[in-house]
Amino acid sequence: MDPIEKLTGGFKRFRDGQFQQQRATYEDLVDHGQHPKIALVACADSRVDPATVLQADPGDLFMIRNVANLVPPFEEGGEFHGTSAALEFAVDHLEVEHILVLGHAHCGGIRSMFDPSPAPANSFIAPWMSLVKSAYLRVEGTMPDASVAEKAHHCEKEAVLVSLENLMTFPNIRERVGAGRLRLHGWHVDIRSCTLQVYDPQQQHFETVG
């Protein structure tokens, strides 16, 4: 089937099925606006749709997706800050109560950091992935003899922690966390084994959800 036709056909099935079943919900979201409690930073990877994996309902998640689910540090310079703008809207306008960074296994962006071949000229991906170079260096330094697959898997989780650290460089986020009005979460999902791990800041490691 043509991929575009598949999507238009999917919309028709949605319109005649789920939309009719949840019509009141969708109308309420339009008439009274969205009020999600959670802002979720996820990867653009087509295999990991957070709404599907987490079985979220319409209006539950304010979604921010980019390559490798990264959060850049706060900065005032520059002109185009899509992820930072989305976080500002989620925190200052929607007043979400949680920000969740959802990492995932088999992430192409993380894996690219372990690719020995040089990045092409004018690459956008390499500079973007440099945001979590510290995660890459920690993995290379602590497990130099591991396979690339093992290193990348550990780096996926380390990158989540870097993004959590970067979230705290935003004054509005730091203020709300300090006041107990906002909580930060780091999760990692593996779609092959269908497992979810949640970072425990007290124990400083990821724990598998039973």
Image (cartoon, grey):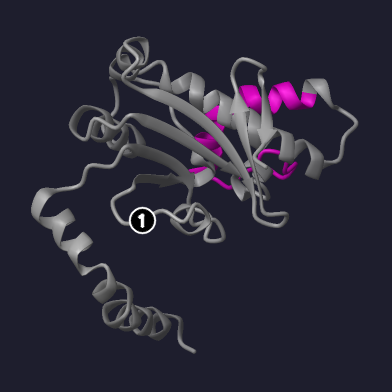
Tell me: 8 left or right of 124. left
Q: Is residue 122 visible?
A: no
Residue drawn at x 73%, y 40% is 153
Tell me: 52 left or right of 10. right
Tell me: 79 left or right of 151. left
Q: Please say if 102 is above or below 52.
A: above
The answer to if 204 sits in the magenta stretch is no
Residue 107: image x %, image y %?
Answer: 63, 48
Residue range highlighted in magenta:
113-140
Q: Amino acid at mark 1?
A: Asp
The answer to if 128 sits in the magenta stretch is yes
Q: Nearer the viewer, residue 35 or 66?
A: 35
Q: Please say if 109 is above or below 143.
A: below
The quadrant where residue 130 appears: top right
Q: Is residue 107 visible?
A: yes
Q: Please say if 180 is above or below 86.
A: above
